[in-house]
Image (cartoon, helix red, strand yellow):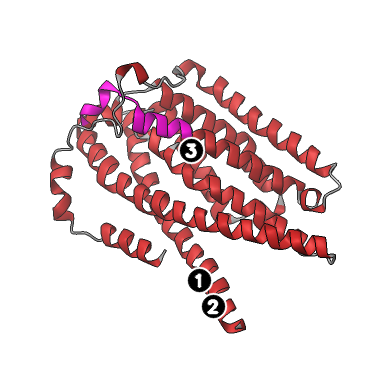
Amino acid sequence: MIASSVIVLGLVRMPLQSFLPVLEAPPARQPRVLLPHRMSLALPSCAASGFWTLAAAGGCTGLLGQLGFQALFERSSDPVLNRAAGNTAHSLVAAAYCLFATVFGVAGWCFSTFGCTSTAAGRVLAPLGCVRWLGAFAFGIIALWDIPTCFAVKELRKPSFLLHHFAMAAVGGLGAYYCPTYYGLFFLGVVEASSVPLSVYEGLERASEIAGEGTSAAEEERCARLKRWRDAAQAVATAAFLFTRLYLFTRVTFFEFWPDALAVLPTMAAGGARNTVRFLLGASAAFVALQFFWFGQIVQQVFVDKWLARKEAA
């Protein structure tokens, strides 16, 4: 993982001159993966008039999942489930949503063909109904389920998480309503790939801690098994974070989205769309900074707290 981080930091520190052709004239962009026309992937679409209705549907979906799973876990006789029913339900709903958003985003970003992506103006300004659909659903599920649940469940009241959720709600709402363009497939969909194993890891970590309180041989065996699963999920989550959040997110933000947005801003008339593009420029840079902050926490948790602790114990 250290090698991966060095590679990422090296890419970020590369001289700006090597990217000047991109900044001066963003090239035409083809689909990441070319498919025959008969295999073209169709994604759901949403008009501006249906944005808030879809957002409400997304929020209700998250709330129903949270309340349903939480009630189910609270009735369970297994302390691994009932001791932290709200937190466990949140991890399950989060994993399901992130998996859905990832599949949606990858389908559009990698496998779909949009005529608007041949120019910078098309990639930044041309509205895509599928991006508005994803943004509306994301806004609803974050604003109506994720944020309220984080306030309701004590263990989830982390400042960095809440800041991220509020910012994501703003990006999903403003960006997808006023400027639902090609890059939304990446920022609202593809990057969620790293959140799936992270949600699984968080659930297993909590389960192993509760199971560790047991004293019987069967409970100790279960705890050991959960810890093995937890460590495997942590390794996958760390690798996914390094590639998706630290490398891809930084590269797409500064070497694809920013050059395109800066190229079209001077040509835009004053109004909501232009202000939204400016907001998205700042928000994307802030999200990159947040990814590096979380990377520091990963280094602290994986290498300092665990690795050094094991070395000292030995």
- Total residue callouts: 3
Q: State which tag comes first along the sequence, 3 or 2.
A: 3
Report, in whole angstroms, how far the alpha carbon at label 2 lies from the one at label 1: 6 Å
Residue named by callout 2: 308
Asked which secondary structure carries label 3, the reply is helix
Report, in whole angstroms, how far the alpha carbon at label 3 lies from the one at label 1: 34 Å
Span shown in magenta: 103-119
Q: Which amino acid, mark 2?
A: Leu
Which is more toward the observer, 245 or 282? Answer: 245
- Please say if the residues under marks 2 and 1 sit with CB atoms less than 8 Å apart: yes
Which is more toward the observer, 155 or 233? Answer: 233
Question: Comparing marks 3 and 2, which lies closer to the viewer?
Answer: 2
Asked if 90 appears above or below 104 in the picture, the reply is: below
Q: Which amino acid, mark 1?
A: Phe
Residue named by callout 3: 170
Asked which secondary structure carries label 1, the reply is helix
Residue located at (20% from left, 30% from top) = 267
